[in-house]
Amino acid sequence: MGLLSEAGRVGLRPELREVVEYRKSGLSLNWIVGCPLDCGYCVRHLFGNFGMKVPRALTTDEEAVEALVSHRFFRPHVTPVQLLNRATDPMLPAVKPHLLRVLGMLDERGLTNHVLVITRWRIEPEDCAALDALRNLRVTMLVTHSGIEDDRVEPVDSGIAAESLRTAFVHAERFRVVLYWRPIVPGLNDSDAHLARGLELSRFAHAAVFTGLFYRDEIRDYYRSHGLPEPYEDQARRKIFPEVLEARILAAAAGRPPGGAVLFRKTSCAVAYAHGTADYNGHVGIRELCDICPVSQLARCENAWSVPDPGVVAAMVKEVGGRLVGITGRAVVVEGLDEQRRYFLQHGLGFQVHDASKPHHPHRHGRADLGWPVIPEAS
Ligand code: SF4
């Protein structure tokens, strides 16, 4: 794959030219952009590069590794990392060799960080062998499967992801496999048959996450311009997941035959469980998220979690340019910090860090208000 020319880069949004960015599940390295898969709900709509179908590299693989490990927010062995999760699919034939190469280079440095790789494309047995050969990194392959049949929304056959999941799970020795069951959209892929299919697939994963749709203005515009049925009348900053749908999924899971993977509401919880580690986002402080988690995992998270010392936190917050507002039994509350700096603190502390101007509501952690009753959080 060639490097994107200077002229090509000029047309990219500044966010896309930034190859390292902090996101909730980890420090995200995106040195290749462009994807032919055309999923209607793709985050590429948010970056204005949905039309870029051919993957192109912004840097060499070596430069990408250097950009990651020298980033001011990267901490060896601590910072969770995501590779190529923003503007391409890492398992596309043109992209995969670069993914494996960068994994190899990070592994050779002896780093034990979690590394999350999200794909809906093909995983072959030889890919699994390459992943299993890594000695240090804790790699998780998150295989996205929605079961959406409307090919105006999702032209890629969900059968590809289902097959990848099986292949990865059967071959995984050292790396872990998570079923990334998303987006689940009311009216589109939430029938009882869809739920049964998702739960059946969870037999081929070490853990499963279910989640809703990231439905913002740009994605809504795409739906409208393509005459797609709109799932919601409003748009929202966070993922949308109606309470009733969650209850149906959990009820269906409770009634399934033994053998399926444990379900989680949060990506990092599934990743942590799959590797036998505590959740690095400190979700255990948001206790209502944990009512579906195995007792042994709850104990693991509780043991690793404690309310941090206010003096220490205040100094950390100040150092990255913010102000500590307070610490509750659930989260550190700050002001003046963007998402990236909040996630940096959150992963370093293993404790939730919230923005005072964006209150989280009980039982709706990190989700949009649509579909949920409005209950202000108790102070
Ligand atoms: S105990 Fe809670 S925080 Fe830990 S993995 Fe389970 S759901 Fe997540």
Image (tube, grey):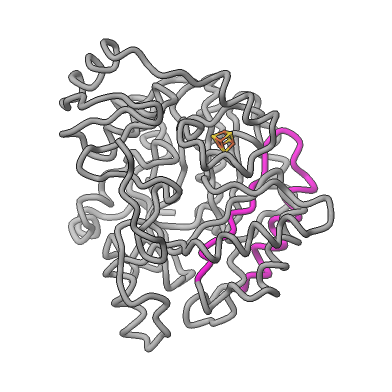
**Quadrant placement of the C terminus:** top left
Determine which quarter of the picture holds residue 207.
top right
Q: In terms of image quarters, where does ligand 1 lie? A: top right
Residue 360 image point, x, y percent: 33, 45
Residue 84 image point, x, y percent: 45, 48
Foreground residue among 99 and 223:
223
Which residue appears at 42% of the width and 47% of the height? 365
Residue 7 visible somewhere in the drawing: yes
Residue 274 image point, x, y percent: 66, 37
254 relative to 110, above or below: below
Determine which quarter of the picture holds residue 124.
bottom right
Q: Magenta region: which residues?
A: 157-185
204 relative to 348, above or below: below
Residue that sits furthest to the bottom in the current view: 227
Q: Residue 303 in magenta?
A: no
Residue 298 lies left or right of residue 352; in this view the side is right
Which residue appears at 46% of the width and 41% of the height? 82
